[in-house]
Amino acid sequence: MPLQGYSVGRDWQLVIQTPTGPLNVPKVTGFSRKMDATTERVKRIDGITDNVRFFDGWSGTLSAQRTGPEVDRYFATLEGNYYAGLNEQPCQIYETITEPNGAYSQYRYEGVMLTYDNPGDVAGDATVKMQFSFTASRRLLVS
């Protein structure tokens, strides 16, 4: 629900769809994403510089509190499959946003590959904070 016309973090819902089903990450605490692109500057003989952009997909990070073994098991399975010589299939991320006007926007990240950057530090008096990153081929507007 937006606050005073501003989007806030609780306006976002994420679903990670793996080839074997949804990856349950219940306590997401942060999600960042950015469009990746390369640019080329073209200096014409008349002295004018044109700028050309080539889209290179999307990337980002997801932070969560560990509440169970789902994420650890997912990455353990991926690692086991890699060493067994099995082909890794990409995931999809669905991002749903409740807009300040009450409408919904939904995007789908295609060709997603996840990397387990930090399974979390373990201490006697702290929660375990996990972080993983993703790269995606594209982000498509669904609705």
Image (cartoon, rainbow, N blue to C red):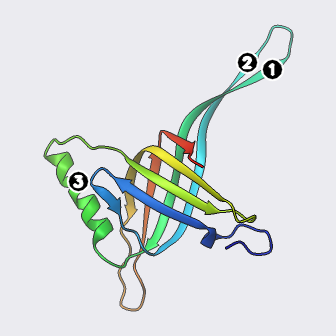
**Image location (x, y in percent) of residue 84:** 13, 46
Bin the neighbour count of mark 2 within 10 Å (Cα to Cα): few under 14, some 14-19, many 20 and up: few
**Image location (x, y in percent) of residue 116:** 37, 59
Element on which disc 1 rests: strand
Q: In the rendered image of this protein, does residue 97 appear above or below residue 28?
A: above
Which amino acid lies under the numbered mark 1 shown in the image of this protein? Thr
Residue 124 is left or right of residue 108, and the answer is left
Residue 44 is left or right of residue 143, and the answer is right
C-alpha gap between disc 1 and disc 2:
6 Å
> What quarter of the picture does the N terminus occupy?
bottom right
**Dots 1 and 2: beta carbons under 8 Å?**
yes
Residue at the far left in the pictured view: 84
- Label at residue 130: none
C-alpha gap between disc 2 and disc 3:
43 Å
**Image location (x, y in percent) of residue 14:** 50, 62
Specify which label sits upstream in the sequence, 2 or 3: 2
Specify which label sits upstream in the sequence, 1 or 2: 2
Q: Which residue was labeled with disc 2?
A: 42
Q: Which residue was labeled with disc 3?
A: 79
Bin the neighbour count of mark 3 within 10 Å (Cα to Cα): few under 14, some 14-19, many 20 and up: some
Specify which label sits upstream in the sequence, 3 or 1: 1
Q: Which residue was labeled with disc 1?
A: 49
Which amino acid lies under the numbered mark 2 shown in the image of this protein? Val
Element on which disc 3 rests: helix
